[in-house]
Image: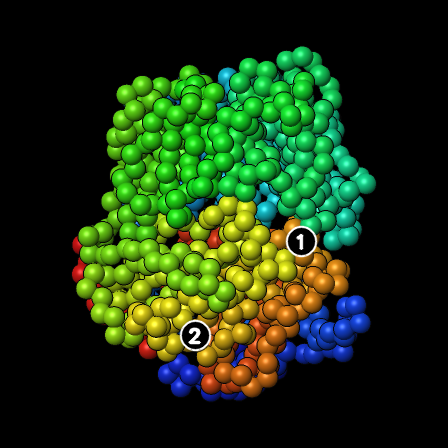
């Protein structure tokens, strides 16, 4: 289906309502979306759902509605005079070589590289850092439009083979293939129906997780239930794979398996988020001892999480927030796993332990100090050896490698500093630049970054990062884009975006608020923004906007907000609660129907963070802020551009469809309400071209509706 189908054809199919849009007094014709008489009863509360039919995204009626909406949205965007130039500028800024942190397995180093504007990054192999690198996998050759992605890659212990996963059009579903690395030959082995899986090698095969193939014609009824673990032996067909673990009594549980580097242990993780549990159980199989069964280390699923970092001989290093909201690392003996036998390796600190990794016989611990990285090196028994000196406040990641590693790689970046890859020598404790990017036409010294702390509604201090052009005048007239997420224990780190420069060089302030619900300050911070406490997240975001205005960075007329996925829910909720505070809103791939999200694909997985409308008390909380259900007739909402995609099988596009139809029908007609529906893309962009087009369209919409006319910038 074309994203830019003729408006005339679609108007005939769906009908249209003519309105006057704010931006440039353009006339915008919204499709008149058909309503049905549908009512649900939630614990005695009757809730209408007039656009329920849009949940069937494969129906001809929904297809016609999608085409009609895009036939309104894309002409609107095309009429913005600087849209094309903005796309050119964003494209120019992103056109530079970008590398991933190298990893090593056996004699090989692996890394990905994008030469600048390739739709997919290319995976390279080299035998030693001084050797010539060779292309191993080029996903750009897999499809004419570049929408097939390399979604997973894991070499075997001896680096003779590797499993790689492919994803079509941004879908969460993957297909696994096997490659012989020496001659780069893809073997016949093919694994289908993979989702939420690790690749765990053991000898001549690997563990993986998948769902059963649904019977023909029953895909919707049976998919996304009964997550199973299999073992695939190389050279065999998938039908011969051994079923290792399943739990038919609990069909919504996830089951994934990892193996330790030495392949002594297979570790099984079991979660049950659909029942509101935020943690996981942990089982282990001692492969060296020939065990055929998984025995429990942690048998009960609670709200506590357990992640195996590595093994030290016959014992396991485990990172956990059990009894430690900021996380700690303990050593567990699988033969005596009772908590009374645990030995604390890294005790809980005031700062949050973001991740723990091992390499070269050392334990690397990355902590968050007010959302910026601090990294320490320990002996495997926990003894502190040194702190790694980072270039400044920002985000660092990596610090992993095999047991015989003499050095590790890590990447460091911030809101104004592009990601630079460093090599850290374990013996000398010295870091050196390995690869530094060269962003065209960008001078980091021209921009200023700062972190502020502002009070939320209940007085809680919330951190927020700001970046803007030096010399900014605090006159309340600066266009500002406020971004947030606030959920699922996710840390919104201060990271670099080349595309964002297109806004900064036009005088924008970019603000990133670290809301409760995330993981910035450990599990307590997370719990203050989930389930019945979710309103705290919205209060935090609203308070960020109020602070920016009170401190003369911007005004309501110059303030735009943006968020994706759970952040799309955030944007939808706050623009309902405080529509006058913001001029522009960009809710992307958002969870908008909080009463039915658990009915679609793996939406039940989010019950652990949101709660469920099946519970009377949680229903009240969800109904009170659900973006779809709190739109009021006649209110002047911000100019709104909703984005989604036809292959999003995580947050299904029906959320955005129903939300857009409701907002178009009920909002005051002074501001545009548009939905941009990408094709052959998923929860994230399926290729770089689509990513750049979406970014430029969002930027153009934001600038246009904030009254910003771009000024020419020097080309370098």
Using the rendered image of the protein, determine whether residue 102 is visible from the camera's viewpoint: no
Q: Nearer the viewer, residue 705 or 358?
A: 358
Residue 623 showing in the rendered view: yes
- Residue wearing tag 1: 607
Q: In which quarter of the image is residue 270?
A: top right
Residue ID for mark 2 = 582
Residue 269 position, x and y percent, is 65, 34
How crowded is the residue under tag 1: few (<14 C-alpha within 10 Å), some, or many (20+)? many
As helix, strand or loop, the secondary structure at mark 1 comes to helix
Give the side of residue 91 with respect to residue 343, left or right: left
C-alpha gap between disc 2 and disc 1:
29 Å
Q: Which mark is residue 541?
A: none
Badge 2 element: loop
First-in-chain label (2 vs 1): 2
Front one among 21 and 347: 347
Report x, y in % for residue 634: 56, 86
Q: Does residue 44 sit above or below 438 in this rendering? A: below
């Amino acid at each position: 289906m074309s994203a830019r189908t003729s408006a005339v054809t679609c108007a005939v199919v769906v009908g249209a309502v003519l309105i006057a849009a704010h931006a440039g007094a353009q006339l915008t014709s919204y499709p008149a979306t058909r309503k049905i008489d549908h009512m649900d009863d939630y614990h005695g509360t009757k809730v209408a759902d007039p656009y329920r039919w849009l949940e069937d995204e494969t129906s001809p009626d929904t297809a016609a509605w999608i085409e009609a909406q895009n036939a309104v949205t894309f002409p609107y965007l095309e009429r913005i005079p600087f849209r094309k130039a903005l796309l050119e500028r964003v494209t120019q800024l992103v056109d530079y070589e970008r590398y991933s942190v190298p990893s090593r397995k056996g004699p090989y180093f692996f890394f990905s590289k994008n030469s600048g504007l390739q739709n997919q990054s290319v995976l390279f192999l080299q035998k030693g850092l001084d050797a010539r690198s060779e292309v191993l996998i080029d996903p750009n050759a897999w499809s004419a439009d570049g929408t097939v992605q390399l979604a997973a890659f894991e070499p075997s212990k001896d680096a003779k083979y590797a499993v790689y996963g492919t994803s079509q059009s941004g879908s969460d579903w993957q297909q696994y293939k096997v490659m012989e690395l020496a001659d780069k030959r893809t073997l016949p082995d093919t694994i289908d129906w993979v989702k939420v899986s690790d690749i765990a090698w053991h000898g001549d095969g690997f563990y993986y997780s998948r769902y059963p193939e649904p019977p023909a014609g029953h895909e919707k009824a049976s998919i996304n239930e009964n997550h199973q673990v299999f073992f695939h032996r190389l050279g065999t067909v998938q039908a011969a794979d051994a079923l290792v673990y399943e739990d038919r009594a609990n069909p919504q549980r996830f089951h994934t398996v990892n193996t330790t580097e030495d392949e002594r242990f297979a570790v099984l993780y079991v979660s049950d988020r659909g029942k509101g549990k935020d943690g996981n159980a942990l089982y282990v199989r001692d492969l060296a001892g020939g065990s055929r069964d998984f025995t429990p280390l942690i048998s009960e699923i609670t709200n506590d999480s357990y992640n195996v970092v590595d093994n030290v001989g016959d014992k396991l290093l485990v990172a956990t927030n059990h009894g430690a909201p900021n996380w700690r690392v303990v050593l567990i003996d699988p033969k005596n796993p009772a908590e009374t036998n645990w030995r604390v390796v890294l005790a809980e600190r005031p700062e949050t332990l973001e991740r723990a990794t091992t390499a070269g016989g050392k334990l690397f611990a990355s902590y968050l100090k007010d959302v910026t990285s601090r990294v320490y090196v320990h002996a495997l028994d926990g003894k502190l050896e040194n702190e790694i000196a980072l270039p400044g406040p920002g985000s660092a990641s990596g610090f992993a490698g095999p047991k015989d590693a003499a050095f590790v790689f890590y990447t460091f970046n911030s809101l104004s500093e592009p990601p630079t890859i460093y090599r850290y020598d374990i013996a000398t404790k010295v870091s050196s630049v390995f690869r530094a990017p060269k962003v065209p036409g960008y001078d980091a010294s021209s921009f200023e970054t700062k972190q502020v702390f502002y009070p939320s509604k209940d007085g809680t201090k919330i951190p927020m990062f700001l970046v803007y052009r030096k010399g900014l005048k605090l006159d309340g007239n600066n266009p500002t884009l406020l971004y947030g997420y606030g959920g699922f224990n996710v840390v919104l780190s201060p990271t670099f975006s080349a595309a964002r420069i297109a806004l900064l060089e036009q005088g924008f302030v970019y603000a990133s608020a670290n809301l409760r619900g995330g993981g910035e300050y450990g599990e307590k911070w997370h719990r203050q923004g989930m389930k019945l406490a979710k309103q705290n997240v919205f209060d935090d975001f609203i308070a960020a906007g109020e602070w920016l205005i009170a401190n003369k960075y911007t005004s309501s007329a110059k303030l735009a907000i943006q968020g994706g996925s759970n952040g799309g829910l955030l944007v939808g909720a706050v623009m309902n609660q405080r529509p006058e505070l913001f001029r522009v809103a960009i809710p992307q791939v958002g969870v908008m129907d909080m009463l039915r999200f658990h009915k679609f694909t793996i939406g039940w997985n989010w019950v652990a963070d949101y709660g469920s409308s099946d519970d009377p008390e949680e229903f009240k909380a969800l109904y009170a802020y659900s973006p779809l259900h709190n739109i009021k007739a006649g209110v002047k909402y911000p100019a709104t551009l909703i984005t989604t995609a036809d292959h999003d099988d995580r947050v299904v596009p029906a959320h955005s469809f129903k939300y857009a139809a409701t907002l178009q029908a009920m909002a005051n007609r002074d501001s545009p309400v548009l939905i941009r529906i990408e094709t052959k893309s998923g929860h994230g962009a399926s290729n770089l071209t689509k990513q750049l087009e979406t970014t430029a369209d969002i930027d153009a919409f934001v600038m246009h509706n904030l009254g910003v006319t771009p000024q020419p910038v020097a080309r370098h």
